[in-house]
Image (cartoon, grey):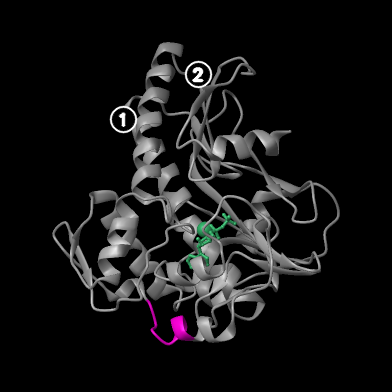
């Protein structure tokens, strides 16, 4: 039922619903932005002020949806068209910031996070909100053809508000970072309006500030096998993001091809079912969770170190949990888990 409603909502650009099931002290609104239900909850704020804030967030989310969407025609598709044609193009401050930060994270993650692979994402059919996709993977030659053109966000030059690139294969796709930056901007807006206890939840990925009355905000971490694996109590200002391989994928017979691609091979990553990152910024948490899924079991510790992260949890495809000592201090597991704690990164 919820899925059916989400599919109907996916047809509309950005809608806004005020929920009727609020708990005492809470104000709650829901928005549907770039394929995700965004839930904003405030605690202890004046009702009028919360409504005003929700109206402002609605306008902000609409702008993001229009400007950052990877395939619905808007500012980002214009930018990508200009890149493909070898032309310079005027961006806006949010896209410039997404690009600059992406460049840093691409570099720090050794290219495991790479938002310039929009061409590959499209080739795999992942420019859709309608999952799962049925059918075979793209041909090897088409993948190789894109790979050898080596698209990278570091190929993008920024001069003032203008962006350009000499690499015509660069196609920006902020699917791995947009939700994170959206939660940051929403928290900034709430803060500027004097709302200091709030949670902005983008389909289980969230940033939380302040508290829920006399207790911290509590955040459930999903188990790729179903249900929840544990609960984290959020500290003053934290972003908690999970990237998963288990929800959005292509399938053919019994073979699944998840939507997170290894930019070095052009193929989906499979070894890890999910990665959860806690840090103080949504943008970094979101991009890092994507980078760490790509890094996989053999490289995640190096990549986490290089991204300056100390709270990371991975679940492999057999349900085994690997987590840092700092993450272990923060998560209360719901049941018995097969876990390995990494003391030093
Ligand atoms: P989710 O939150 O849905 O688990 P992510 O935050 O990891 O997913 O984002 C996945 C999306 O990011 C893909 O749909 C695609 O648009 C884009 N993407 C896929 N692989 C990469 C990659 N290696 N680096 C950057 N972006 C990617
Ligand atoms: Mg991500």
Q: Magenta residues, as a range? A: 145-151
Q: Residue 336's quadrant in the figure?
A: bottom right
The yes-or-no answer for disc 2 within 8 Å of ligand 1 is no
Q: Residue at x 68, y 50 (%)?
A: 331
Q: Residue furthest right?
A: 336
Residue 214: x and y, percent? 59, 24
The residue carrying mark 1 is 192
Q: Is residue 99 above or below residue 157?
A: above
SS category of the residue bearing label 2: loop
- The image quadrant where one finds the C terminus is bottom right
Q: Residue at x 45, y 34 (%)?
A: 14
Q: Is residue 198 above or below residue 338?
A: above
Marks 1 and 2 sit apart, C-alpha to C-alpha, by 16 Å
Is residue 316 visible in this depiction of the protein? no
- Residue 323: in magenta span: no
- The image quadrant where one finds the N terminus is top right
The residue carrying mark 2 is 44
Residue 74: x and y, percent? 33, 49
Q: Nearer the viewer, residue 234 or 92?
A: 92
């Amino acid at each position: 039922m919820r899925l059916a409603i989400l599919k109907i909502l996916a047809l509309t650009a950005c809608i806004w619903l005020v929920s009727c099931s609020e708990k005492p002290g809470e104000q709650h609104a829901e928005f549907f932005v770039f394929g995700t239900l965004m839930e904003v909850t405030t605690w202890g704020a004046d009702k009028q002020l919360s409504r005003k804030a929700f109206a402002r967030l609605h306008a902000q989310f609409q702008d993001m949806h229009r400007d950052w969407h990877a395939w619905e025609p808007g500012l980002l598709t214009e930018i990508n068209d200009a890149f493909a044609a070898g032309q310079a193009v005027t961006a806006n401050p949010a896209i410039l910031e997404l690009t600059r930060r992406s460049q840093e994270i691409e570099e720090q993650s050794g290219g495991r996070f790479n938002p310039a692979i929009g061409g590959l994402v499209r080739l795999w059919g992942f420019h859709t909100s309608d999952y799962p996709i049925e059918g075979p993977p793209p041909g090897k030659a088409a993948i190789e053809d894109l790979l050898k053109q080596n698209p990278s966000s570091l190929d993008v030059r920024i001069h003032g508000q203008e962006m350009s690139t000499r690499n015509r294969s660069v196609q920006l796709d902020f699917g791995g970072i947009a939700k994170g930056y959206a939660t940051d901007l929403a928290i900034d807006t709430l803060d500027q309006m004097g709302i200091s206890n709030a949670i902005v939840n983008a389909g289980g990925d969230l940033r939380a500030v302040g508290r829920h009355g006399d207790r911290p905000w509590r955040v459930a971490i999903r188990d790729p096998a179903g249900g929840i694996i544990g609960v984290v109590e959020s500290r003053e200002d934290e972003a908690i993001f999970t990237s998963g391989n288990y929800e959005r994928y292509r399938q053919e017979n019994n073979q699944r091809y998840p939507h997170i691609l290894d930019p070095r091979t052009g193929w989906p990553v499979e070894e890890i079912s999910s990665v959860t990152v806690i840090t103080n910024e949504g943008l970094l948490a979101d991009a890092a969770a994507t980078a760490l899924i790509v890094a996989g079991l053999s490289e995640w510790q190096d990549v986490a170190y290089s991204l300056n992260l100390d709270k990371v949890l991975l679940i492999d495809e057999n349900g085994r949990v690997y987590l840092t000592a700092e993450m272990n201090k923060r998560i209360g597991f719901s049941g018995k888990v097969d876990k390995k704690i990494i003391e030093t990164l």
